[in-house]
Image: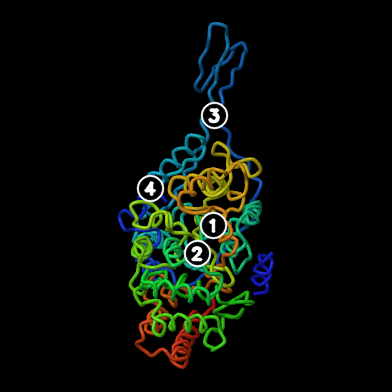
Amino acid sequence: MKKNRDLRESESSKSPDFLSTNITRRKAISKAGAAAIGAVVGAVVAGSGGYFAGLSQAGPARTETVTRTVTQTVTGTVTQTVAGTVTQTQPPPQVVEVTWGIWSWGVELVQDNAEKFNAWNDDVKIKVVDYGLDTFFSGISAAYTAGNPPTIHYSTPDVTYIYQQNGWAIDMEAYFPEIRRYLDDIFPGFRSGFINPDTGLMSGLAYYGGAQPFMYNKRHLDEAGIGEPPKTWEELEEQARTIKQKGINDDPIGIWYGSWGFVEVGIYDFMLGMAEGDKGPYMWDEDLNPIFNDKGSALFRSLRWQLDMIHKEKLASTKGVLYDEAQAVNAFGSGAHTFFWMPDYDLAFANTPPSKEAGNLRMGMNPGTGKVSAIYRSYLVSKATADKGPKHLEAAWRVMQFVGGRTRNGKPDFENGEYFVCRRLNNEKGVGPIYISMWEDPKYADIRESIKTWVDPEIKKQVLFNTYDFFNDPRMTTWWSEWWGYWQAGVARPAIHDLILGNVGTSDDDILRVLNRIAEEWKKKKAESKTGK
């Protein structure tokens, strides 16, 4: 646990077609999570590994020209010229196939990236395997169980940890220590998500990441005569009251409690913004004991404020309990709320045509501390790949660097290469990177330029520097998603939804009663996990 604490202390220093089918990256795994967790949360076995570094890459096919007098029988494939020169062609190098497991989003771009890699490499070939949307994690888990997982695949922090506990996934740093060089280029609030909490080693590189920042409708503020967005929660309340009194918006404070937004927005964004002087963890101590079921906790304070805004001040409503991601984007983009919290990349859709409020929406710093919850996805490599031997493992590392690191013409080049795939994801799909250099280095000016139509890149960079890894608060567990209800029903979500809806009362004692109940459920799941991890 000290290692986790030290890590956190050291850190303190889309294109519009994306939602056209009303299916988001989140929804791509929302239904699959339950099947995935059920498939893997059984017997936990210890992972094994070893140390592997310094492999030489197989070279390209060579043609050797040998000039000599032929006085013996020549075997093999030869071509003899009139001058007596024998040209012997060596067999081509062994081609290692790397299967890349993806979910069904941006498939054409993924395929194009794979084709580019294959054109630049003749000894390693990528084969894209699409595991679907709602079936992604159940399909990946089934592949692991059957012993034929993909070489490399997308993953979310909650599922990554389960795979690590089952011994299915490896820490790439155990084999390629140089991966650690990438950690300093990741925004501090995301770094813990790429470290295996049990080993302290990096598991992989970033697919994409972002934040769930505070956003506001500038048109509403202008009409109300408000010059700048709120800096404190008191200012937020006063501005919301003014906007409602002037008839500009009847539901100014929009809170997204539905689907996965319940955890990242409805819970963490408010806790983080209100937790003055509290650096976390916010929900559990270093030994994973609940610390939220107390009237002095950040969760209690934030729930108290939200219930007051909904049931007492009438400046917010319970509509957000029903929002999925697409509905949240549509609500803010249509002007249903003045203030909102949601993924940064979703602003690209809410703030561009045909959205009703296109051009009026802004990203800002969260009132209070400025901190907001982080979102990120990573690349994970299966242990089955390491079991196949050095060539397969090195091939996986080369592909991981191509899709999530720095390369030049498809070859690893940390010092002088570029984040080729990460750049394409941002510029062509609006999926932002979480590498600091991509927001500061002049050679990535196109990254900042590409988002200016819907967000101020400097504000977004500030937001990214103020993110908190709620997945590791203080660390991931095998029952985390099951308890939160992240991709499934869970324990905490329906209980807190009852509070928001007023079904169990809204007094301080009512809040504490609910928090005590879900704290007991957490302790129960911790005990049932056998390992306590």
Identified at 54% across, 39% down, the residue is 410
* Residue lying at the far left of the rendered structure: 21
**Circle 1 sits on which residue?**
460
Please give left or right for residue 132 compared with residue 406 in the image: left
Which numbered marker is on residue 61? Answer: 3
Whether 293 is drawn above or below 133: the answer is: below
For label 3, count other residues whose C-alpha is less than 10 Å away and answer few (under 14), some (14-19) or many (20+).
Answer: some
Q: Do the residues labelled 2 and 4 touch (CB within 8 Å)?
A: no
Which amino acid does the dot numbered 1 rest on? Lys
**Circle 2 sits on which residue?**
213
Identified at 36% across, 86% down, the residue is 502
State the separation of the CA atoms marked 2 and 3.
52 Å
Q: Do the residues labelled 3 and 4 touch (CB within 8 Å)?
A: no
> Closer to the observer: label 3 or label 4?
4
**x and y percentages locating residue 54 in the rendered image:** 66, 46
State the separation of the CA atoms marked 1 and 2.
9 Å
Specify the quadrant that holds the C terminus: bottom right
For label 4, count other residues whose C-alpha is less than 10 Å away and answer few (under 14), some (14-19) or many (20+).
Answer: some
Q: Earlier in the sequence, mark 3 or mark 4?
A: 3
Q: Earlier in the sequence, mark 3 or mark 1?
A: 3
Q: Are marks 1 and 2 in contact (CB under 8 Å)?
A: yes
Please give left or right for residue 201 compared with residue 294 in the image: right
Secondary structure state at the residue bearing disc 1: helix
**Circle 4 sits on which residue?**
107
State the separation of the CA atoms marked 2 and 4.
28 Å
Which amino acid does the dot numbered 4 rest on? Val
For label 2, count other residues whose C-alpha is less than 10 Å away and answer few (under 14), some (14-19) or many (20+).
Answer: many
Which amino acid does the dot numbered 2 rest on? Pro
